[in-house]
Image (cartoon, rainbow, N blue to C red):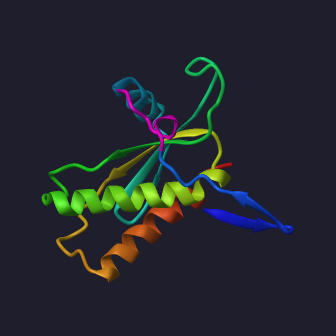
Amino acid sequence: MVEQRGGAATTVDLGFRKRDRLQTARGFSLVFAERRRLRGEIFDLHYRSQDAATLSAPVGARLGIVIAKKLAQRAVQRNLLKRLARESFRVARRELPPYDLVLRLAKSPGNSLDRAARSVWRADIQQLLIRLPR
């Protein structure tokens, strides 16, 4: 994506690369062990600041996603929720502090896949990212 700033065009990276993800069970466990979370309408956002003990240098915000089959039975819906989470994270990543984040589905989102449901889910994720302490 190209963004105009002060007459000069700059490119904005909206990818979701390996460096942007929590990948290991240890990474998820460290975030859950911290016991800091924000509650949304259907999602919980667990967060942990990155420190020198876990990384050689902070790499910016990283995201892990947990969508349980028990709460979203259909694979189509689980995949949609993950896509919406990644999209919201990619857009907000530049403004986020260097945290390890785990977005977890906490309540059943229902069986609907319509636009109204998608906008509610997206808004819930975006509100959680905005509410993160800076």
Where the N terminus falls, by quadrant?
Answer: bottom right
Q: Quadrant of residue 30?
A: top left
- Residue at (43, 28) in percent of width and height: 27
- Residue at (27, 50) in percent of width and height: 67
The magenta segment: 17-24
19 lies left or right of 78? right
Residue 70 visible in the shown view: yes
Q: Where 103 falls versus 81 (above or below)?
A: above
Residue 131 visible in the shown view: no
19 lies left or right of 41? right
Return the x and y of residue 131 as percentages of the image width and height: 58, 58
Q: Where 41 falls versus 85 (above or below)?
A: below
Return the x and y of residue 127 as percentages of the image width and height: 52, 65
Return the x and y of residue 28 as percentages of the image width and height: 39, 32
Total numbered badges shown on the rendered structure: 0
Q: Is residue 71 magenta?
A: no
Q: Where 119 falls versus 74 (above or below)?
A: below
Q: Quadrant of residue 60?
A: top right
15 or 80: nearer the viewer: 15
Q: Quadrant of residue 46?
A: top left
The majority secondary structure of the magenta stretch comes to loop
- Residue at (25, 67) in percent of width and height: 109
Residue at the right extreme of this rendering? 6
35 or 113: nearer the viewer: 113
91 lies left or right of 52? left
Return the x and y of residue 123 as percentages of the image width and height: 46, 71
Q: Is residue 22 magenta?
A: yes
